[in-house]
Amino acid sequence: MADQLTFDDPRTRYPKLHPRKQQQDGTGLQSEMKPVPDLGESTYRGTGRLTGRKALITGGDSGIGGATAIAFAREGADVVISYLPAEQSDADHVLEQIADAGVHGFGIPADLTDAAACRSLVTSAVEQLGGLDAIVLVAGKQVSVIDLADLPDEQFVQTYEINVFAAFRIIQAALPHLRPGATIVTTASLETYQASEERVDYASTKAAINNLSKGIAQQLAPKGIRVNTVAPGPTWTALQISGGIPVEEEKGYGEETPLGRAGQPAELAPVYVFLSSPESSFVVGATYAVTGGMPTP
Ligand code: NAD
Ligand code: MG
């Protein structure tokens, strides 16, 4: 059976999207998307790269975080995923895949706009897993607003709380638990470098998370803890159809990439695995672009 290691043509590994116009409220449910994004359920094959690791993955119910959680489990890691309570059904799907991989999986609903919730998420993850040595921060908020004049102050603040402040708070709370060899992977975006005029709040948080990660990487490397960042390009996820992009842009989504199509979450997961695995031992403070060829500096 084909898996992520099958030699094929990257242009046609996934078909071009023909999504029906769709919009969901809140963060959206991936299970209700048409088509449903691929988290690697039937393709990702583990090879023991994260054996025995204890991982916390935020936003692990769906999309890039969900695909990463499934990949981590199949690589041998026990996994805690966090998500919003309304996303429990998406989380259950991922937790089922984790259980099928024969490792331990736990779901912890938590609203990361709340500072105390960020800290107690770390405490609960350490309790459930019996330690913590891999942190993967994928949770994020992206809401397009065409006119700057219409951008609500509350949205601006929340986007920073989830995308930037939560990352700082979770990493800081985790510090006492991280031993040499532990890894942290954060999630930036192509928009780190190419600010979208429709997403000035979001794009600027992604520049912030990229910079924050490089600063923290320098401080933690002398302690044997590696921090790196993934910068995804256009990827088919619930984020986009719950206000992330204007509904008119759903048709042809991702076709501007040199590969001519959007990415699928399953195509991001291997990079999170690599950056968390000891095989990337000399990779520190790096940003890995996974953009289908959209150029980054
Ligand atoms: P997604 O909607 O599947 O995942 C985002 C997750 O963030 C949600 O599932 C939710 O659990 C979590 N989240 C949102 N608000 C939260 C809150 N208040 N508290 C706790 N958790 C919250 O979409 P995705 O595209 O897989 O997003 C994952 C990451 O990838 C985000 O950081 C996003 O910015 C980044 N990214 C995505 C794309 C893309 O094209 N999809 C491109 C670049 C970067
Ligand atoms: Mg979700």
Image: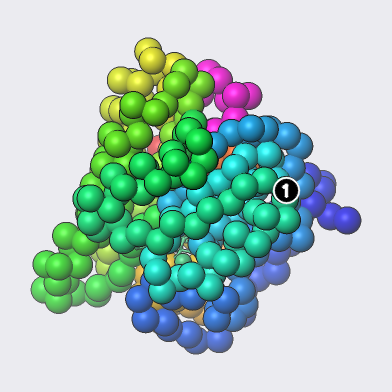
| Residue 137 falls left or right of residue 113 | right
Image location of residue 81, percent across then percent down: 49, 53
Q: Is residue 289 visible?
A: no
Quadrant location of the C terminus in the rendered image: top left
- Please tell me whether residue 246 belongs to the stretch shown in magenta: no
Does the beta carbon of the residue at mark 1 sit less than 8 Å from ligand 2?
A: no
Judge whether residue 279 is colored magenta: yes
For this view, does 223 lie left or right of residue 134? Answer: left
- Residue at x-position 69% and y-position 40%: 75
**Residue located 43% across and 52% down the image:** 58
Residue at point 38% right, 15% down?
Answer: 223
- Residue 213 position by quadrant: top left
- The magenta span reads 274-284
**Viewer-proximal residue, 263 or 142?**
142
* Relative to 19, residue 118 above or below: above
Which color scheme did the rendering employ for the protein?
A: rainbow
Residue 179 in sight: yes
Q: Mark 1, residues whose alpha carbon is within 10 Å: few (<14), some, or many (≥20)?
A: few
Residue identified by numbered label 1: 102
Between residue 83 and residue 229, name the one nearer to us. Answer: 83
Give the position of the N terminus as an image quadrant.
bottom right
Q: In the current view of this chain or complex, which residue is farthest to the bottom? A: 21
Q: Position of residue 161 (x, y in %)?
A: 23, 54
Residue 214 in percent (x, y) is at 33, 29
- Residue that extends furthest to the top in the rendered view of this protein: 222
- Residue 32 in the image, given as x and y percentages of width and height: 55, 81
Left or right side of 210 for 8? right
* Left or right: residue 112 compared with residue 190: left
Residue type at numbered disc 1: Gly
Q: Secondary structure at mark 1?
A: loop
